[in-house]
Image (spheres, rainbow, N blue to C red):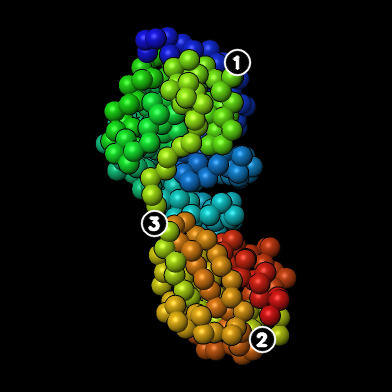
């Protein structure tokens, strides 16, 4: 089957099965640019179902690019609270400022210009080029990778490399509806060609799929090294007040409020009799000793927070998890 028929089948499926997503609403071209920019930033490393309520709230509070460029950081972070990877929010605002100042409030329309914006890499720039500007580009996200791995039954390390998968994208061909086509392929990956228990009998590509013919749907993932690191968090408490600091020490959760922490050796972690918790953060398994001290030290730029104020204060989920554990020691 040629690539033209592939694209027709995919678009036919999409027209009959696509989800209603808030960033797909019919809006003006300028607003479409803004919706796509915000949603693509939010969707970096976050699932659609998680993003939906955050996107709706974000757009209600910050309705356009001009507002985003001028928004107070405290309001921005409150809108982003709970989504994680907070550098995305900071980069999104920086990008809004650049677009407002350098491009008269409209998204630039070349890959090179888009990739020069903070937080916009190869994938995001290509997604924007296709969705906003209808350019014949297919970005490589996890959903599209999974479809290609199954269609071509790719199992070896060299076969699932980014370069090899990019070469295989020609399978999808092209269409004049590039803006819909990219979303259609991703939609099939999300709803049909799922990581586990794919719905092959609903898939428009099953006749082309080697994995379907072999009845073998395992998806080979490139080996990722998950680092294990050890930390000691000092829980300074005075009655119902806890001490937090603005994180300027670690690469994770930059500038966000955390408990004072230091990285420690594995031996110290294992020999400690204090309460311990594990938190997974990006590609790191964090094993943390909780050392409680009932006294507040003199520290610059400290934040004193009452425990019953945690919901009304902008805190990363990481800090909230430690707060939750603190009440049990």
For the C terminus, give its image quadrant.
bottom right
Q: Is residue 130 above or below residue 75?
A: above
Q: How many marks?
A: 3
Query: Where is the N terminus found, in terms of image quarters?
Result: top left
Alpha-carbon distance for marks 3 and 2?
40 Å
Q: Earlier in the sequence, mark 1 or mark 2?
A: 1
According to the picture, the residue beneath numbered tag 3 turns out to be 225
At horizontal 52% and vertical 61% (from top left) the residue drawn is 280
Residue 301 versus residue 109 in the image, above or below? below
Q: Estimate how packed mark 3 is, as few (under 14), some (14 to 19) or many (20 or more) residues with alpha carbons within 10 Å.
A: few
Q: Which residue is mark 2?
A: 238
The answer to whether residue 102 is seen in the rendering is: no
For the point 48% across and 21% down, which residue is it?
A: 213
Is tag 3's residue or tag 1's residue first in the polypeptide sequence?
1
Q: Which badge, 3 or 2, is on the more N-terminal residue? A: 3
Q: Secondary structure at mark 3?
A: loop
Q: Which mark is residue 16?
A: 1
Relative side of 175 to 298, left or right: left
């Amino acid at each position: 089957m040629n690539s033209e028929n592939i694209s027709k089948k995919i678009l036919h499926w999409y027209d009959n099965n696509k989800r209603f997503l808030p960033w797909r609403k019919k809006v003006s071209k300028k607003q479409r640019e803004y919706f796509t920019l915000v949603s693509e930033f939010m969707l970096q490393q976050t699932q659609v179902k998680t993003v939906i309520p955050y996107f709706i709230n974000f757009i209600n509070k910050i309705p356009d690019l001009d507002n985003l460029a001028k928004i107070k950081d405290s309001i921005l972070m409150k809108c982003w609270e709970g989504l994680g990877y907070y550098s995305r929010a900071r980069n999104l605002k920086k990008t809004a400022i650049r677009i407002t100042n350098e491009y008269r409030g409209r998204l630039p329309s070349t890959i090179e210009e888009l990739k020069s914006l903070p937080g916009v890499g190869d994938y995001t720039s290509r997604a924007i080029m296709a969705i906003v500007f209808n350019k014949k580009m297919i970005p490589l996200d996890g959903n599209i990778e999974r479809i290609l791995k199954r269609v071509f039954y790719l199992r070896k390390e060299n076969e699932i490399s980014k370069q090899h998968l990019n070469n295989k994208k020609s399978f999808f061909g092209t269409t004049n509806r590039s803006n819909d086509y990219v979303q259609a392929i991703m939609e099939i990956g999300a709803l049909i060609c799922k990581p586990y228990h794919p719905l092959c009998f609903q898939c428009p590509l099953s006749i082309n799929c080697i994995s379907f013919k072999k009845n073998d749907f395992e998806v080979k993932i490139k080996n990722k090294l998950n680092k294990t690191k050890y930390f000691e968090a000092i829980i300074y408490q005075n009655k119902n007040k806890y001490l937090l600091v603005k994180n300027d020490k670690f690469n994770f959760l930059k500038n966000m409020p955390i408990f004072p922490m230091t990285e420690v050796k594995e031996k110290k972690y294992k020999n400690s009799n204090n309460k311990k918790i594990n938190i997974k953060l990006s590609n790191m398994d964090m094993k943390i000793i909780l050392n409680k001290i009932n006294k507040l030290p003199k520290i610059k730029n400290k934040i004193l927070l009452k425990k019953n104020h945690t919901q009304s204060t902008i805190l990363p989920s990481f800090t909230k998890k430690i707060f939750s554990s603190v009440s049990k020691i």
